[in-house]
Image (tube, rainbow, N blue to C red):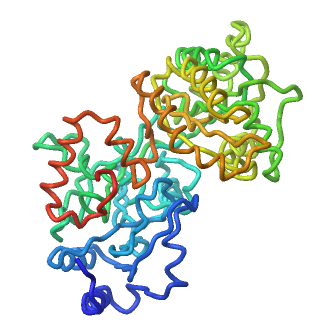
Amino acid sequence: MIITPGHLEKLKEISGPKGWMEDPADMQPFLIEPRDKYQGRTALILLPDSTEKVAEIVTYCARHKIPVVPQGGNTGLVGGSIPSENELLINLKRLDRIREKNAPNQTMTVEAGCILSHIQDLAAQLGLLFPLSLAAEGSCMIGGNLSTNAGGVNVLHYGNMRSLVLGLEVVLPSGEIWHGLGGLIKDNTGYDLKQLFIGAEGTLGIITAATLKLFPCTSEKQTALVAVPSPQAAVDLLALTRSISGNCITAFEIMPRLGIEIVTRHMPETRDPMSTPHDWYVLLECTSSISRSLLDLEQVMERILAKAMDMGLVLDGVIAKNETESDNLWRLRESLSDAQSHEGGSIKHDISVPVSAIPAFLREAGALVETLIPGARPVPFGHLGDGNLHYNISQPLDMDMQAFLDKWQDLNRHIHDIVQRYNGSFSAEHGIGRMKVDELAHYKSKIELNLMQQIKKALDPDNIMNPGVILK
């Protein structure tokens, strides 16, 4: 469909005086993917301030078969919210109202443009917790978190976004509004429709609001960074931690020595808290909503580490004495992606395998990388507790950056083949977007692809909703 000047003027009228932009300089920040892998183009960015305006925009676009791309905070890493020349961008940042705070029900109903950190702060004001936490929480929006089924560091305890939502409001590709904002924990009245749209990356509809689950606020927290002799020791430490702490373990992150060196070399206000270098590190955190008078979490952490050292699973470690020290330990982990950019080119993977398979995967993948690109420097890190690793590879020190990056696609396929053999996933938490469409077509079974295509066709027969994302 050709988007005519008449279409643009009508959509401006629908959106209202502050509801659109077309100046190239103003639009530029909305059209660049955070890693600069995608540069978008569009004739118009629409900025509706209500669900009804979103619905009116989509109704008009559906009538004229104009494709649209929904966008939140534009923090995604697979190009899923970047438009092409023949698509219009609908950014939801003006849908930022808190519709309801219900402390007795432990829920909050928010619009899609609400910033994640704002939601966390509002939950804390209620004496409750919204546990989704990730590096981009100061700029990512809850609509995008829902559309990508975001995970983050607390999935081990609380689950990803699928587990944190009780209801959705969605504008369908027809322009109709599905009002599904129920706050019920139990509701077995047919299909759980909200799960269709969570993780669909805006290809089946535009999420405009959500009812979120809140949890008792954390009253105790213990954070420790420990050195472990191997990834297998890290896996064994996870099992030990679970057996001693029960359900108190909320985060369990693995980092290699090279990761610590890169962070402390490039990121200000970071330092290695241990005097002796080690090959592998685990950042673990235990939290509880039970008061210290009933559960002393400090004793729990000390018992875990004492037992682990007796078993040879931990070589050294530090326990944060206060919130500042805890933040400093987390900064080592959360700065890894940014720090890697200072080391030249980086080929990235967002994979998951069963936790028990992580040591074998790391051995096999490391040998493969050395064979394919001698001198390349793997920096695998991430959420060992739920099997999700960011298997990032920094370029060899003596290699041209572009020559290294040109190997991205070939190396991806080899790494993903290993992941497939371990019954893993080539996209654990970042989604498919535009970047991994071919990978999905390659690794998913024919019946899975057919089912997804049938769902897409049923809800979006004219393919106007984020075309080219997830499915070809």
191 or 247: nearer the viewer = 191
111 versus 446 height, above or below: below
Total numbered labels? 0
Left or right for 123, reference 375: left
Which x, y percent locates residue 283?
66, 32
In the figure, residue 9 lies in which quadrant? bottom left
173 or 100: nearer the viewer = 173
318 versus 186 height, above or below: above
Which x, y percent locates residue 59?
18, 76
Which x, y percent locates residue 249?
55, 28
181 versus 379 height, above or below: below
79 versus 186 height, above or below: below
Residue drawn at 34 percent across, 38 percent down? 442
Left or right for 266, reference 87: right
Q: Specify the farthest residue to the right.
A: 275
211 or 104: nearer the viewer = 211
Residue drawn at 66 percent across, 49 percent down? 403
Quarter of the image where the N terminus is located:
bottom left
Which x, y percent locates residue 285?
62, 32
In the figure, residue 211 lies in which quadrant? bottom left
